[in-house]
Image (cartoon, rainbow, N blue to C red):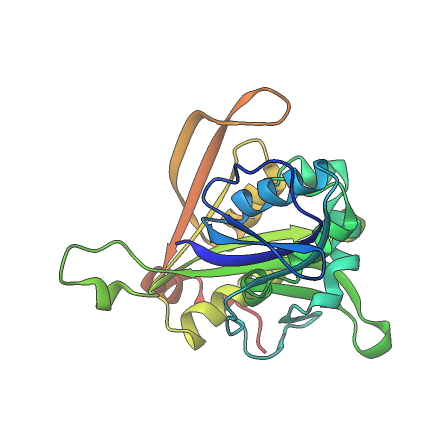
Amino acid sequence: MSTTYTIRIAGLPLDENWSGLTIAPNHDGTSTLTGEIRDQAELHAVLARLHESGATLMELHSAALSPVLAGPLRTARLTLRPAVADDATAIWAYRRLDSVDQWLTGIPSDPDVFRAMFADPARLARTIVVEHGSGARATVVGDLMLRREDGWSQLGMADEARGSQAELGWVLDPAHQGHGYATEAVRELIRYAFDDLGLRRLVANAFHDNDASVRVMERVGMRREVHMVRDSLHRSGRWMDSVAYGLLDDEWRAGHGSVGESR
C-alpha cells in the first residue's frame, strides 16, 4: 500500500526525473517533493539519491498514523513501548553495524538521513522499542516492527479481511544478544497481536542464512511456510535463499498461548 510523502530539501534538485514525485520550488529557497512511495525500501532509495546529489534534507512527512502499540507492555525483564523520534540515535548506533545491517534492507550512511526516515509518522507508528531496566537506567536493547495488513480476499470479502493480519520484524543490539531478549520480546508482541488487537495471522520473513532470526521464529512457535531458493539479491552480490514463517491465532492458543510473558 502506497503512502503520500512530502519531502522538503534546501535548494532545487538538478535531476528532474523523480519517478512520479512532483517538485515545487518554495519562496524560501527550498524545494518540496510530493508523491506516492510504495514502501520503506523505495523511500530509502529516494532519500539516498537526494543525499548523493548533495541536497540537504530539512523535513519529511507522511499521513499521520496512530501507533500500533497504544502503551507500554512489560515482561519479566523488558519493556516494549511505542517508538518516538528521539529513539533514532540509539537505534542508529546498532543498526549501522555490519553484523546487523547485512540482514536488513539497508540503512542510510548519513545519520541525519536516518533520523529523518525514522521520524516519519508511518514508520514510528509500526516501530516498538525494547528496553531493559527502568527509569533512568533503562537501556534500548532492540526494536520491533508490527505492520498491520489486509489479508487477501476474493471480491466482496475485503471488509472482513481488512487489517486481519500483521508482519513482524525485529532487530537486537549485538551487545545484548545471548540473553533471550529477542525471544521474550517477540513472544509478548505475538500475545499482544492476538489478544489485544484480535488479529488472526502473523508472518515474518528473513534470509535463510540469518540463523539468529530464524531461531527466534521457531522458538516463538512460528511455522515455516515458504523456502524460496536464491530469490533475494544480497548486497554481497550473492543470490540468497529466503524463508517465510507464519502463525495463526488458533495455533497460538492451542500450543503457544501459555508461553507468552505477562504484561
Left or right, residue 15 beside residue 161: right
The residue under the point 61% across, 65% down is 128
Total numbered circles:
0
Q: Position of residue 193 (x, y in %)?
A: 45, 68
Q: Position of residue 256 (x, y in %)?
A: 44, 62
User: Compared with residue 29, is residue 54 higher up or lower down, i.e. above or below?
Assistant: above
Furthest-front residue in this view? 27
When asked about the image quadrant of residue 72, the answer is bottom right
Which residue is at the front of the view, 258 or 207?
207
The residue under the point 21% across, 56% down is 153
User: Compared with residue 32, is residue 72 higher up or lower down, i.e. above or below?
Assistant: below
Q: Can the viewer see residue 173?
A: no
Left or right, residue 130 beside residue 254: right
Furthest-right residue in this view? 136
The residue under the point 14% across, 57% down is 155
When asked about the image quadrant of residue 254, the answer is bottom left
Q: Position of residue 151 (x, y in %)?
A: 30, 57
Q: Position of residue 159 (x, y in %)?
A: 23, 68
Quadrant placement of the C terminus: bottom right
User: Compared with residue 148, is residue 233 higher up or lower down, i.e. above or below?
Assistant: above
Which residue is at the front of the view, 62 or 156?
62
Furthest-left residue in this view? 156
Q: Can the viewer see residue 110?
A: yes
Left or right, residue 161 beside residue 247: left
Quadrant placement of the N terminus: bottom left
Which residue is at the front of the view, 76 or 68?
68
